Amino acid sequence: MRPSGRDLSEMRPVSIETGVTKHAEGSCLIKIGDTHVLCTATIEPRVPPFIKGSGLGWVTAEYGMLPRSTTSRMRREAAMGKQGGRTVEIQRLIGRSLRAGVDRVALGERQITIDCDVIQADGGTRCASITGGWVALRLAVDKLMKTGDVTSNPLVDPVAAISCGIYAGQPILDLDYPEDSEAGVDGNFIMTGTKKLIEVQMSAEGATYSRAQMNELLDLAEKGIDELVAIQKEVTGA
Amino acid sequence: MRPSGRDLSEMRPVSIETGVTKHAEGSCLIKIGDTHVLCTATIEPRVPPFIKGSGLGWVTAEYGMLPRSTTSRMRREAAMGKQGGRTVEIQRLIGRSLRAGVDRVALGERQITIDCDVIQADGGTRCASITGGWVALRLAVDKLMKTGDVTSNPLVDPVAAISCGIYAGQPILDLDYPEDSEAGVDGNFIMTGTKKLIEVQMSAEGATYSRAQMNELLDLAEKGIDELVAIQKEVTGA
Amino acid sequence: MRPSGRDLSEMRPVSIETGVTKHAEGSCLIKIGDTHVLCTATIEPRVPPFIKGSGLGWVTAEYGMLPRSTTSRMRREAAMGKQGGRTVEIQRLIGRSLRAGVDRVALGERQITIDCDVIQADGGTRCASITGGWVALRLAVDKLMKTGDVTSNPLVDPVAAISCGIYAGQPILDLDYPEDSEAGVDGNFIMTGTKKLIEVQMSAEGATYSRAQMNELLDLAEKGIDELVAIQKEVTGA
Amino acid sequence: MRPSGRDLSEMRPVSIETGVTKHAEGSCLIKIGDTHVLCTATIEPRVPPFIKGSGLGWVTAEYGMLPRSTTSRMRREAAMGKQGGRTVEIQRLIGRSLRAGVDRVALGERQITIDCDVIQADGGTRCASITGGWVALRLAVDKLMKTGDVTSNPLVDPVAAISCGIYAGQPILDLDYPEDSEAGVDGNFIMTGTKKLIEVQMSAEGATYSRAQMNELLDLAEKGIDELVAIQKEVTGA
Amino acid sequence: MRPSGRDLSEMRPVSIETGVTKHAEGSCLIKIGDTHVLCTATIEPRVPPFIKGSGLGWVTAEYGMLPRSTTSRMRREAAMGKQGGRTVEIQRLIGRSLRAGVDRVALGERQITIDCDVIQADGGTRCASITGGWVALRLAVDKLMKTGDVTSNPLVDPVAAISCGIYAGQPILDLDYPEDSEAGVDGNFIMTGTKKLIEVQMSAEGATYSRAQMNELLDLAEKGIDELVAIQKEVTGA
Amino acid sequence: MRPSGRDLSEMRPVSIETGVTKHAEGSCLIKIGDTHVLCTATIEPRVPPFIKGSGLGWVTAEYGMLPRSTTSRMRREAAMGKQGGRTVEIQRLIGRSLRAGVDRVALGERQITIDCDVIQADGGTRCASITGGWVALRLAVDKLMKTGDVTSNPLVDPVAAISCGIYAGQPILDLDYPEDSEAGVDGNFIMTGTKKLIEVQMSAEGATYSRAQMNELLDLAEKGIDELVAIQKEVTGA
């Protein structure tokens, strides 16, 4: 029934390759089906002004899409002179989600910036960015722990994200682009490895959904998060 | 227990005054406690390029805060040369939410723009904008129906929004600014008058929440939406 | 003869409601006929770099129009990415005019920002902004005097502004929008309560005027200023 | 008494050299003392959208200062990414003033753009721009009349501008930069050759002035305009 | 003697992997040592306005660096609100160089956009972009020829680019980042496979060079171009 | 054969008038045929952050064209809100070229900014800017040496620039605009008075050139540089 031919609760194949760029303190290339996102983590000693001197750390994120990551070429945001509303929304979400899984006291007064750049897009880029972004963050923090700059683990529970939606009246897991374009209701669930909720965003465009459906979507999401967290743990040795 | 002294499930006083500006096709001033938002609806014959010739209507929204609507003065976005990420996120949410309650075929090929300008802010401005925005939209559509430009009612079920959050470990309804600043988890529920869900956004900042808590928040939200929709119906005669 | 049916020297009804927002140090809603402007005053301890350490105070202003304050909707300046030339011109005028009535030594090294936001426009918004702006400024200064932060009154003489023009060959006072659109010559007179001139701006668009007409316009302006200052004094107890 | 040593009603030496660039349809270099402005006129067949098809012509202006036209180097507006408020105000004034002296029916549906670029500044650049701008405009119109594109003279009465101010309590004519920096009251008078008023702008910065002083300034301005118009007529053969 | 330990005329290892993204009409990942650039080609039916209707084709290019492609993180140009001067210079160079190798009549009235995005940088990114960009262009044109949209080969002679410089007084080929930072003279040679020159850019920063040295650099460049073109031909089957 | 009727190796008449503005520390108006550029030098005590405290000086440049310096009017870059790619490229070239001829130790920790503003354009504006820019720089440095602020001459060898190209198959010197528009290959040579190379930029647009032609162009360039340097020396007494 799904355009992809997958079962309603079947995810696309997932792979995460770590250490893909030589400069970043942590990096990975996450592939969720045909969605490929390069995630890098940069450690810097400075923090934003509003926490200067607090001893607390900060994690932030930026997101971008290469112009031809999409079916037809998108205009380059740098050439347009600004990041679009969708980009801003997504990078705020990535940063907020990752921060929810960080013990900012244990991290200490430093900033880690996660850059998520979409090399190829086929739906679910923001979820892939969060899931891959956590891996890059984990690898960067591992470096800080190895050098003794951080002594207590600030990342006790992984953070992952998965999309769900209602397609042709049925809840489905992990929408690809053709499914996403058709679904009247879709959104993202961001959770920790122990299934605690960090963020739920479930939107309807020209449609609505019932509370019962919301519960079915949450069931699907928990299944997807389990699969993603297993891979995150495997590739980071966490 | 709440800074406001309200019960956990108690909303602030709500009032909606209609017809507050002479130029707009629909307008209201919504007050939810000390949060005051002016909402206006503008009808235009043109639609965005991507639906030109489709016969379908469009509803969009813009949001702004007056510089001194807040405790300390904010910089004017026009003077900064761009709308901030928060503004863009909010106005996209308002537009999406209102569209979910519109029969775009019945509306016909025209655009209605809802402007939501915050005169005074004390938490919950985006929810007030959606709830008041629907009233302005309803009044503008009434004009179109009175003149016969629209013959079938495109707004069968009202749209309203309410914030909920977890404060000191307990779910609360309709957060004001001091509550919002302290809550580790908070978000917005947007529903129709028949309690169908349009959008759920529940975020944690440096915290997490359980699925059971999510359900308690939904219970509170349904109570709040009931109260708001009753007022929307009363002031619009819907 | 005037579209408004008023006598040549007759102003529109004027009202000034004070204390309209809870956050600002001073505020009022001024209504001159159908022109409604919300004016707020914000006191800040910092001053612009060029007077730092001088002991002198500063008064500045910003101006904006809500998108649907006008007959047809204007684009939001924040969305366009800049303040238009007309906006910049007006806010510079408001700031300069109010400063002319301030004893900056008595004010002391602090800045007061006057925000003038047009809720509904029907001609004469810049004059209403200056007249209402002075009331907001007066109320903010009163607070500083009550707390003893300012000991000598820095606002000895009120500042008010009124438009005049030549319509169908005859000088008229206080133009509303239909009159303003038709007048070949129009401008603004800004004066103190004792009728000292602060600024005269009298422009012709595709027309000219004689020195005798200039004098008649000044006579009208003095009459209008008298009426405005009386109301300013009444609402501020000055 | 004046820093320049001039009499109260004495202008600086004025010269206008025409035909200074080979590409423009009209051009001149106007020197008023040490203030040097290059003015060019460009004729284009297109008009702004709001008069398309009306048969009426349009005259508009742009203004700029070379970075080192001033005592200390100013930042280049192109590098800053926008024209400052002062620039926008001045170029609107130049355009409006010149249009007041144009018979737009006689000009026919075409646009003439006057560019005023300040090569060296010593006070009074906006007045020099208007006075020199009219000469460039006159020369461009002469070309249109020579080719028969325009048959009835659209520029019957020259337009010129002069600054006046109150310095050390006394009205003075044609302020140079040191005088302008010290004067508490100053402004510009724009008139036609027959002494009809086009625009009066008289501002006080931290000061006020009386109606009697306003009249003395107008007397001075009329004297200055007479001298400028004589030179305009001489160099254009008008 | 070189920091890299290479011989003066020794290039870094070069590899070009084609077909790396599923959406683009042509794509490759070029690696020149540790410099990795993703190049994609997009075919569009529209051409720039200045050649509309001419029957001629157009090739243009855009360039970007991922924020953490460099040793320390660069600010994202989209977030800064504009492309920097270096970016603009480079993308103009890439477009101009590739166009020099295109028979625009044979290409027909269509545009091909080459996007060059630097995944990892270690010197020579603009040269890698041109060399890899030609491969992406070749693959896109192959598609057009396979479908019969283009019948005569518009790319008869490959285009490649290589950097040279003077390091510690000696001419060297293919500078990596540490060499580039130290060289007083460096630049790029862009040539066709038959060694015709397309562009020479040889700059000194705080240094100069002799005509004899210029000739030695050209000798080195010819050697490098030979090696690059051999690989281009191999991977495209050209 | 050349549109200008000049011999292949014949330059246009060159004149350099010094001391043309009263505010700048050094200035000249350079005329190369109908290309006229105003060059000014501004000395400032501050240097860019990356050399603060190094004791080294800095020379930088900015470039602009007056809107009607060209055959048809160009849009003003300040009004467009940014400097175009061509402007940025040119001003970076001017700065880099002039710095190559400066002993930055001898100059001492100060910055000299060269502004090059094109009054009238007829091809070769960037070369005229470099040649004239060096004269303005020389005059500013002379002032520093006269006051004893600089004791050792930081400008031992003049810097000049000349364009060359291939027109109708033949190498030509100093292209004017009609020649430049037609030449398939053209570029700029920047050298010192002793014929040391600073920068070579030779581009083909839809064409290529041989190494032999490159050598002929270099021969022409050396001839042109000799003539320009002679004039630079004459007007500066260097």
Image: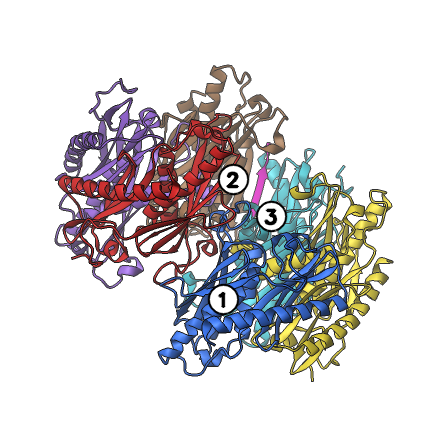
Chain colours: A cyan, B brown, C purple, D red, E yellow, F blue
Look at label 3 and name its amino acid: Phe
Mark 2 residue type: Leu
Q: Residue at x 15, y 43 (%)?
A: D213
Work out whether residue C185 or residue A121 is closer to the camera in this orientation and state it.
C185
State which quadrant residue A49 falls in: bottom left
Q: Does residue E70 appear left or right of residue D237 in this picture? A: right
The mark total stands at 3
Is label 3 on the same chain as label 2? no
Q: Check contact, mark 2 vs mark 1: CB within 8 A.
A: no
Q: Which mark is residue F133?
A: 1
Q: Which residue is mark 3?
A: A189
Q: Quarter of the image containing the N terminus of chain A?
A: top right
Mark 2 against mark 1, which lies toward the viewer? 1
Secondary element at image label 1: helix
Q: In what element is the residue under mark 3?
A: strand
Indicate whether residue D208 is drawn in magenta. no
Residue nearer the viewer, A84 or F231: F231
- Residue reaching furthest bottom? E1
Residue shown at 37% from the left, 78% from the top: F146
Screen quadrant of the C terminus of chain A: bottom right
Q: Crowding near pointer 2: few (<14 within 10 Å), some, many (20+)?
A: many
Tag 2, which chain?
B
User: Relative to residue C237, is residue F52 drawn left or right?
Assistant: right
Magenta region, residue range: A200-209
Q: Position of residue E81 (x, y in %)?
A: 52, 53
The answer as to whether the residues below labels 2 and 1 share one chain is: no
Identify the residue at image location x=59%, y=36%: A204
Chain of the residue displaying label 3: A
The kind of residue tagged 1 is Gly
Disc 3 vs disc 1: which is toward the camera?
1
